[in-house]
Image (cartoon, rainbow, N blue to C red):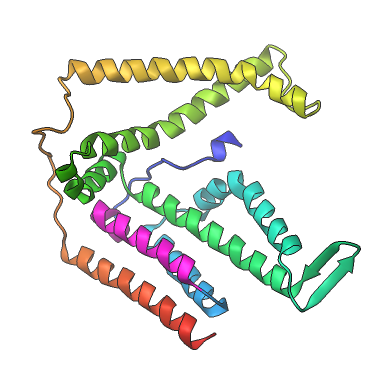
Amino acid sequence: MLKDITLGQYFPGKTVVHRLDPRTKLVLMIAYITALFIAKGLFAYLFMFAVLLTCLTISKIKPKAILRGLRPVFIIIIFTVVLNIFFIRGETILFKYGIIEITAEGVITAVFMASRLMMLIVSTFLLTYTTSPIALTNGLEKMLNPLKKIKLPVHEFAMMMSIALRFIPTLIEETDKIISAQKSRGADFETGGLIKRAKSVLPIIVPLFISAFRRADELATAMESRCYHGGEGRTSMKVLRLSPIDYIALLFGAAIVASVILLGIYTN
């Protein structure tokens, strides 16, 4: 299960999506998420799914990687579906037994909520899959540059976000190694009640925290030895510049939001 967590991984490529400016991809992701929450009705959701599928096809990200990334959040999706089915009330009753009541409105809402959640997660994956941590840091810092006027540490914040994303796969791999080591010593993480399973997690959490703090200390030492003193006066080896493809992509993002709004007006 831990190996299925792919958030923070980067798959190098030379596609149009990979070549887009990181600022463009951040804006497009925000636009897509906004459109997802605006979307109402079947046609709007089908349109959003078609847009996401097109982006995935262009980026040449393997469907296996997407499905592997969705597997760890499958329980959350199922939980969301169950909550909407049993707690959304409507006029068209499909099933009723005692206090349990399932309506057509609840089922439709559950399907839409699950679809929205999956598309939201996959769009986030698409950003990290096609953007290197360094490019993502530079893009985020450039977008937040106006906040420097109110003395906010923009560079440090962007660097912190990049390091967090970069070390997600590393910590997952470390956790998997610790679990394997504990199992080889006779540890049992799969049987017993809830309390027993919670106690069995302690032999994993303690060494994982120690390992994380050790890696953080090593990283801090490495940055200090390279005379890192924050973002004041720093320059970039690769200066970010928007290309014609970026402007076309931004227009495409604006068209998506406008289309979802129009679909909501004319199809409902």
Q: What stretch is highlighted in magenta?
A: 16-39
Which one is nearer the viewer's eye here, 234 or 232?
232
Query: In this rendering, is residue 92 above or below 75?
Result: below
Q: Tell which residue pokes out farthest to the top in this image.
A: 185
Q: Can residue 160 be seen in this view?
A: yes
> Taking 164 as reference, is 44 left or right?
right
**Rendering coords of residue 51 (x, y %):** 43, 69
> Taking 172 as reference, is 162 left or right?
left
In the picture, residue 161 is in which quadrant?
A: top left
Q: Can residue 15 be seen in this view?
A: no
**Rendering coords of residue 41 (x, y %):** 56, 77
Query: In this rendering, is residue 178 above or below 151?
Result: above
Examine the structure image and report whether residue 187 is included in the region drawn in magenta.
no
Quadrant that contains the N terminus: top right
Residue at 55% x, 58% y: name it.
Answer: 117
Quadrant that contains the C terminus: bottom right
Q: Magenta stretch mostly in which secondary structure?
A: helix
Q: How many labels does the image show?
A: 0
Q: Tell which residue pokes out farthest to the front in this image.
A: 150
Q: Tell which residue pokes out farthest to the right in this image.
A: 98
**Rendering coords of residue 256 (x, y %):** 37, 73
Which one is nearer the viewer's eye here, 61 or 168?
168
**Rendering coords of residue 91 (x, y %):** 76, 78
Residue at 53% x, 47% y: name it.
Answer: 69
> Taking 73 as reference, is 241 left or right?
left
Which one is nearer the viewer's eye here, 241 or 79?
79
Residue at 39% x, 37% y: name it.
Answer: 165
Examine the structure image and report whether residue 22 is included in the region drawn in magenta.
yes
Residue at 55% x, 57% y: name it.
Answer: 118
> Taking 143 as reference, is 164 left or right?
right
Query: In this rendering, is residue 188 above or below 70?
Result: above
